[in-house]
Image (cartoon, helix red, strand yellow):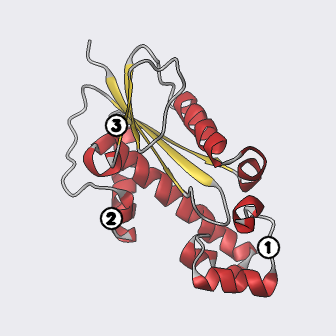
Amino acid sequence: MRRAIVGIDEAGRGPLAGPVAVGVVWISPRAKLSYIGLTDSKKLSEKKREEWFRKMKEWQKEGKIRCAVTLVSHGVIDTKGIVYAVKLGIKKGLQKIDADPKRVEVLLDGALSAPVEFTKQQTIIKGDEKIPAISLASIAAKVTRDKKMKSLSKKYPQYGFEIHKGYGTLAHRNALAQYGVSKIHRISFIKK
């Protein structure tokens, strides 16, 4: 029996504000999918990421993939650290897609790892560029997090989250200097 592939990647590890997003994508071993033009979310335009995200929703309706994105809050990041937050996101994402550790092979980007019960797992450097399942997870995480930051920008318009998504750009640092920290800033990151 062929195993289903599960790709995992995160978005928003480095920003000064907002949650970290972890994308988990299960691909059926029977699915015939076209990955032409697919790559790491950071190398795609916002429009292309949105197109892939819509395609993923269609594939999910057709039962070809299962996709989940877990947002882990700035509060968890501040109290437990970013590594813990990402691990928690991975664990919850795998639960959301109902991944059976005995029936899946988990492929993760960079230095990520899945819970130990997933004995068939592999971490791939630049996996988000090389492995379609990880690229899809990367896109799902990025699109979901960007939407969250755009919605938060309505509550905190002075910071410009809709533009920089919470990353430490000059404009964001200037806003911090002028207005101080908001309720969604990662205090532990700003101290650094």
Which residue lies under the disc numbered 1? 181
> Which residue occupies 34% across, 61% down?
51
> Which residue occupies 56% across, 64% down?
147
Q: Name the residue type under label 3.
A: Glu
Q: Name the residue type under label 2.
A: Lys
Q: Check whether the beta carbons of the residues at disc 2 and disc 3 lie within 8 A of each other.
A: no
The x and y percentages for residue 142 are: 48, 58
Q: Is residue 25 above or below residue 54?
A: above
Q: Is residue 100 left or right of residue 32?
A: right
Of marks 2 and 1, which one's residue comes earlier in the chain?
A: 2
Say which mark, if any, is on residue 62.
Answer: 3
> Which residue occupies 61% across, 62% down?
148
Q: Check whether the beta carbons of the residues at disc 3 and disc 1 lie within 8 A of each other.
A: no
The x and y percentages for residue 76 are: 74, 47
Residue 17 shows in this picture: yes
Of marks 3 and 1, which one's residue comes earlier in the chain?
A: 3
Which residue lies under the disc numbered 2? 43
Q: Residues within 10 Å of mark 3 (few under 14, many from 20)?
A: few
> Which residue occupies 56% across, 51% down?
21
Of marks 2 and 3, which one's residue comes earlier in the chain?
A: 2
Q: Name the residue type under label 1.
A: Val
What kind of element bears circle 3? loop
